[in-house]
Image: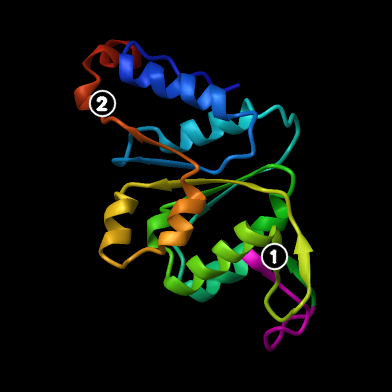
Amino acid sequence: MIEIHTQDGKMRDIVRLAETVAPTKSSVLIQGEAGTGKTTLGKFIHERSGKIGAPIVTVNCAQQPEMLLETELFGFEKGAFAGTVSEKRGKFEQANGGTLILDDVSELTPKLQARILKVLETNYVERIGSKMGISVDVRIVGLSARNLADSVAQGKFSEALFYKLSNVQTLLPPLRVRIADVKALV
């Protein structure tokens, strides 16, 4: 079980918020600089969700080209591409009943933002090459080193997706302002 040990007052408040939101179905947006513990907090929330044994799946949205990321997230049907001889379940299906952590969610292309928004609105995912939706029950935890509200204001991120992802949102402070935690981490 993941434990978050902190002496910092703001981090204690964040941990309490995470414990409060964990048993709900709310999407969570965790923002903060690289190395602040966004992934750890996302896993902490999942572990305390009460869904023992439920899947937790993490996808980095910045490490793959759009087409590859689309197939990873949504899967595909047999014959959807030349040479595909079997279907593939996407990360939404793999996380069904549990949590899908979207790391670097700020890096999603507009096309993928729209597809993810549709899943959040309908609770159905469509594999590539299919017109039939597959019902999914997935909590989304979005992680971002960028301020998504700023990205929305600049027209770089979907406002509708931002609001769907940020039912609950928090900003993790960097360690340089959490001096009380340095000794605990060392």
Queried whether the magenta region covers residue 25, the answer comes back as no
Magenta region, main secondary structure: loop
Residue located at (71% from left, 27% from top): 50
Mark 1 or mark 2, which is nearer to you?
Answer: 1
Residue located at (47% from left, 31% from top): 41
Label 1 with label 2: CB-CB less than 8 Å: no
Q: What residue sits right under mark 1 in the picture?
A: 125
- Asked which secondary structure carries label 2, the reply is helix
Instruction: Where is residue 68? Give x, y as percent.
Output: 54, 71
Local crowd size for mark 1, using a 10 Å CA cut-off: few (<14), some (14–19), many (≥20): many
From the viewer's perspective, is 30 left or right of 19? Answer: left
- Image quarter where the C terminus lies is top left
Instruction: Where is residue 128? Give x, y as percent.
Output: 67, 77
From the viewer's perspective, is 37 left or right of 2? Answer: left
**Eyeballing the image, is 34 above or below 11?**
below
- Image quarter where the N terminus lies is top right
Q: What residue sits right under mark 2 in the picture?
A: 175
Give amino acid for label 1: Val
Queried whether the magenta region covers residue 81, the answer comes back as yes
Instruction: Where is residue 177? Give x, y as percent.
Output: 20, 24
Quadrant of res 10:
top left
Q: How is the image coloured?
A: rainbow
Q: Which residues are magenta?
A: 74-85
Indicate which disc, 1 or 2, sits on the residue closer to the N terminus: 1
- Please tell me which residue lies in front, 82 or 36: 36
- Asked which secondary structure carries label 1, the reply is strand
Tell me if I can see residue 186 in this picture. Answer: no
In the rendered image, the residue lying farthest to the bottom is 82
Residue located at (39% from left, 32% from top): 37
